[in-house]
Image (cartoon, rainbow, N blue to C red):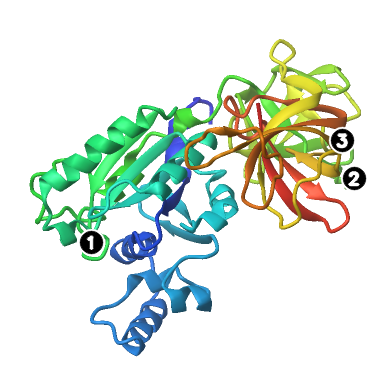
């Protein structure tokens, strides 16, 4: 790995994407079609779905049953929880987060979309933009998902009409200009029949763009990572203390930003001590450089007291260090957010405690308008709050680095994760 070629590693390795849309827009059917047409399901899975489809008296195999795993989901024909699915093609590996469409499951969408490179938002060709289309687009923007693909689904129910697609595309284009999104795409599909999902549609010869699968395999995601600001949160100190590695002291973690090379001068926070990288080790042996999202073990030339929660950075490119923090938080718990409440906070590998000093406003997730006269933050609400931590947090703004710009809040009495926050 002497040549710095991030695109090869990141493109070939993994694409995370999330699906969203209004209830009954066909999210589960689309994922089932992707899995089925890319031959990523086992024979026994298909056999079980075929039996379930026959049992429900359906005319054809219901591919949505491949992802609707909960019995209540199958009975209602909707998605309730976040369903994660894994599949691969010769070009890429994929993790799909199939998220619910109901407003009461906003927290589920935030959870599923928080690490996504791309969001697929389904739109019913018969209905066009609806309230959930706007809400899911806003949430995707809030979470800084770099790529949004609007799939205008159920084109078979509008006779594959080009004008129906163009009208919705124009409306979505006008709407998406208000959002801060780098890359927006539009695809006409029929998930039920497989048109433009994996194979090109013979029914829509007027569409000359890529299929959804081709787009997922080829979309450029290497530049989605922050390759400028070097950030390495230490997760674990490795001391084998064996005869072979008697003096070995390595610092294991995942690179959250920038490129670290053997021989680089680095600084350790919070101590401020400096050293040079002696080696970068992996399970497969030593390498010359590391970049996001690689998990590695670094050794330094000097013996410095480093422990879990410390961060290795560049001396001339340090993150912010604050105890007073502003963040947008999505509340995940049935117990409402308590003003002056005390919570545990987790940021990268660092743990601390905090107190909620102020609730500035809630966000109307349908319009993104601020609600300043109602400060009660309940489950699924998104709000801007101010907190003070017991010790400084080393962070970047969420808009600059999603990894070092995110936190979770934990109820210390129950150990439940109650909030997911994006640092401003």
Residue at x 71%, y 55% (from the top left corner): 333
Residue 236 in sight in this render: no
Residue 21 in sight in this render: yes
Do callouts 3 and 1 mark residues in contact (Cβ within 8 Å)?
A: no
Q: Position of residue 234 (x, y in %)?
A: 77, 35
Residue farthest to the front? 373
Q: Give neighbour class at mark 1: few <14, some 14-19, many 20+ (Cα, 10 Å).
A: some
Q: Is residue 130 left or right of residue 115?
A: left
Residue at x 44%, y 68% (from the top left corner): 78
Q: Is residue 332 above or below residue 312?
A: below
Residue 300 sits in which quadrant? Answer: top right
Q: Is residue 386 left or right of residue 112?
A: right
Residue at x 12%, y 44% (from the top left corner): 163
Question: Which one is nearer the viewer's eye here, 282 or 210?
Answer: 210
Which residue in the structure is indicated by mark 2?
241
Instruction: Name the element at disc 3.
Output: loop
Q: Position of residue 317 (x, y in %)?
A: 69, 14
C-alpha gap between disc 2 and disc 1 = 57 Å
Q: Is residue 45 above or below residue 267?
A: below
Q: Is residue 271 above or below residue 406?
A: above
Circle number at residue 24: none
C-alpha gap between disc 3 and disc 1 = 52 Å
Residue at x 36%, y 32% (from the top left corner): 176
Q: Earlier in the sequence, mark 2 or mark 3?
A: 2
Which residue in the structure is indicated by mark 3?
307
Which residue in the structure is indicated by mark 1?
194
């Amino acid at each position: 790995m002497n040549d710095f070629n991030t695109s090869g590693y990141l493109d070939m390795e993994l694409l995370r994407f999330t699906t969203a849309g209004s209830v009954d827009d066909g999210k589960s059917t689309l994922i089932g079609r992707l899995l089925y047409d890319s031959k990523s399901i086992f024979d026994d899975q298909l056999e079980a779905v075929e039996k379930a489809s026959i049992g429900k008296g359906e005319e054809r195999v219901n591919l949505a049953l491949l992802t609707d795993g909960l019995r209540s989901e199958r009975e209602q024909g909707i998605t309730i929880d976040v369903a994660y699915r894994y599949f691969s093609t010769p070009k890429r590996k994929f993790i799909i987060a199939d998220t619910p469409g109901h407003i009461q499951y906003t927290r589920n969408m935030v959870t599923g979309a928080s690490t996504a490179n791309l969001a697929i938002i389904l739109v019913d060709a018969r209905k066009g933009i609806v309230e959930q289309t706007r809400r899911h687009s806003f949430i995707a923007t809030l979470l800084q998902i770099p790529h949004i693909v609007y799939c205008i689904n159920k084109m078979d129910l509008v006779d594959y009409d080009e004008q129906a697609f163009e009208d919705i595309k124009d409306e979505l284009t006008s709407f998406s200009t208000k959002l801060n999104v780098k890359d927006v795409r539009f695809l006409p599909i029929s998930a039920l029949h497989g048109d433009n999902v994996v194979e090109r549609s013979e029914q829509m010869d007027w569409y000359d763009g890529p299929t959804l699968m081709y787009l997922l395999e080829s979309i450029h995601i290497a530049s989605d990572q922050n390759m400028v600001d070097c950030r390495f949160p230490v997760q674990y100190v490795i001391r084998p203390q064996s005869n072979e590695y008697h003096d070995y002291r390595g610092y294991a973690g995942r690179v959250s930003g920038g490129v670290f090379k053997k021989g680089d001068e680095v600084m350790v926070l919070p101590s401020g001590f400096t050293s040079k990288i002696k080696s970068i080790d992996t399970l497969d042996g030593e390498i010359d450089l590391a970049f996001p999202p690689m998990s590695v073990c670094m050794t330094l030339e000097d013996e410095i007291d480093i422990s879990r929660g410390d961060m290795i950075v560049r001396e001339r490119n340090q993150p912010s260090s604050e105890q007073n923090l502003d963040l947008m938080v999505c509340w995940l718990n049935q117990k409402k957010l308590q003003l002056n409440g005390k919570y545990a906070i987790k940021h990268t590998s660092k743990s601390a405690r905090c107190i909620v000093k102020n609730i500035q406003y809630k966000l109307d997730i349908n319009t993104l308008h601020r609600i300043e006269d109602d400060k009660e933050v309940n489950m699924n609400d998104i709000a801007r709050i101010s907190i003070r931590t017991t010790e400084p947090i080393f962070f970047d703004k969420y808009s600059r680095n999603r990894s070092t710009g995110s936190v979770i809040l934990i109820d210390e009495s129950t150990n439940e994760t109650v909030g997911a926050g994006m640092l401003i």
